[in-house]
């Protein structure tokens, strides 16, 4: 009997261990921002056992919950007629050159400024009760197109110097809406594999955090989540998501939660909130990203959980590691006193780790 040689696609279809290397945001408009807003609400209320939140941060999380809820509404109502997606030829070109097809640094559609305007309009009702938020919104509205584009350039490049830290989350939020919309409509099989595993293959941006997924074909695999387009791409576990070395990786959890490991009552291996949020540090580059494990909290939301676990950033930075990339909804920079949001997170970062 002659054995037939299998074509490549046939081999892949026979490989039951195949898992998606890329998880694009689902095309359903509510699927990214609505769960994120719901998660921020629970985090702000202290209802997520693995991430204790102090009152100083809680107010900021509530504000960002409103921003993310406005993102969900803005995306749902988005008029996509003026927003061009890359055509097949552009996708093929990106693949040939292993370049991200929705490159964040490429010229962007001016449509995002309309998204920003809609987002701010939706926040007006929240701002009625928050003078500081109203001031930030008013400050953004008086900027001309050039100034807004300049802010967007700084946000995309994560250039903190001179950036207004109170305005930046709103700019980032508008850009996220556009890029998430775009990413959700790409054919995943045409998204190239980049030479580096540390940048988003869809838009070339930095990851905000990483997550170990459970369920279906992604079971047990670790993904990095893009801070701009919400795509998730696979990276093997125990590998630095900043420099891709794997020799000097360590994990740090929230201090008090780990300290009582020895005396704590027995906890199921799965669903142990103490193991949920960790920083993955690297002694090769002294950078870190956080890693969240869905096995220990099914409702993990990398961007929201990263934002809420500021205490872990304090612990890890005191140990000498630097954040490899910023959270788009939290910027430390030049906050003009008159435009600072009501609850700036600085007080949280200065308080003693819990
Ligand atoms: Zn991306
Ligand atoms: Zn490293």
Image: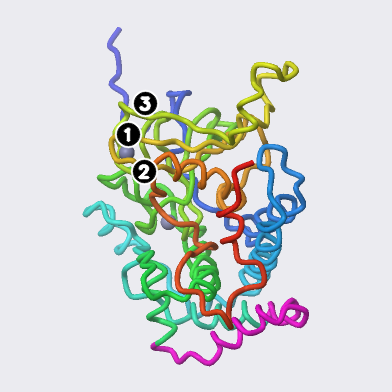
Magenta segment range? 122-146
Question: On the picture, is 88 further left or further right than 19?
Answer: left
User: What's the residue at 47%, 76% (across, down)?
Assistant: 164
Q: In which quarter of the image is residue 148?
A: bottom left
Residue annotated with mark 1: 283
Q: Is residue 102 above or below residue 259?
A: below
User: In what quadrant does ligand 2 lie?
Assistant: top left
Decide if ligand 2 comes within 8 Å of the CB at mark 2. yes
User: What's the residue at 57%, 50% (across, down)?
Assistant: 310
Question: Is 179 part of what is drawn in magenta?
Answer: no
Residue annotated with mark 2: 287
| Label 2 packing within 10 angstroms: few (<14), some (14-19), many (20+) | many
**CA distance separating discs 1 and 3:** 39 Å
Question: Is 124 part of what is drawn in magenta?
Answer: yes
Question: On the picture, is 310 further left or further right than 272?
Answer: left
Q: Is the magenta stretch mostly helix, strand or loop?
A: helix
In the rendered image, residue 264, in percent from the top left (x then y), is placed at 72, 20
Residue 110's tag is none
User: Helix, strand or loop at disc 1?
Assistant: loop
Can you tell which of label 1 and label 3 is closer to the viewer? 1
Residue annotated with mark 3: 11
């Amino acid at each position: 009997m002659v054995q037939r040689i299998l074509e490549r696609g046939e081999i892949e279809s026979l490989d039951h261990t195949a898992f998606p290397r890329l998880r694009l945001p689902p095309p359903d408009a509510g699927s990214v921002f609505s769960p994120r807003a719901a998660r921020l609400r629970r985090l702000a209320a202290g209802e997520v056992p693995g991430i204790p939140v102090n009152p100083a941060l809680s107010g900021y999380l509530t504000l960002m919950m409103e921003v993310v809820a406005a993102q969900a509404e803005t995306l749902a109502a988005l008029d996509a007629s003026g927003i061009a997606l890359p055509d097949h030829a552009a996708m093929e070109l990106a693949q040939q050159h292993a370049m991200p097809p929705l490159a964040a640094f490429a010229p962007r559609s001016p449509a995002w400024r309309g998204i920003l305007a809609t987002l701010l309009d939706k926040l007006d009702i929240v701002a009625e009760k928050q003078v500081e938020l109203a001031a930030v919104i008013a400050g953004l509205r008086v900027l001309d197109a050039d100034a807004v584009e300049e802010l967007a350039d700084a946000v995309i490049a994560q250039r903190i110097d001179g950036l207004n830290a109170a305005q930046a989350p709103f700019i980032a939020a508008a850009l996220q809406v556009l890029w998430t919309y775009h990413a959700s409509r790409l054919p995943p099989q045409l998204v190239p594999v980049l030479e580096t595993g540390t940048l988003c293959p869809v838009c070339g941006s930095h990851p905000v955090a990483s997550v170990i997924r459970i369920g279906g074909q992604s079971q047990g695999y670790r993904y990095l989540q893009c801070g701009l387009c919400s795509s998730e791409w696979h990276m093997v576990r125990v590998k630095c998501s900043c420099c891709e070395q794997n020799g000097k990786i360590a994990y740090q959890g929230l201090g008090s939660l780990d300290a009582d490991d020895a005396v704590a009552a027995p906890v199921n291996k799965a669903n142990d909130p103490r193991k949920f949020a960790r920083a993955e540090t690297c002694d090769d580059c002294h950078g870190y990203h956080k890693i969240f494990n869905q096995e220990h909290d099914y409702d993990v939301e990398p961007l929201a959980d990263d934002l809420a676990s500021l205490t872990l950033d304090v612990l890890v930075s005191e140990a000498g590691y630097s954040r490899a990339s910023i959270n788009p909804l939290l910027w430390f920079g030049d906050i003009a006193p008159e435009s600072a949001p009501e609850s700036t997170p600085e007080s949280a970062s200065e308080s003693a780790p819990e």
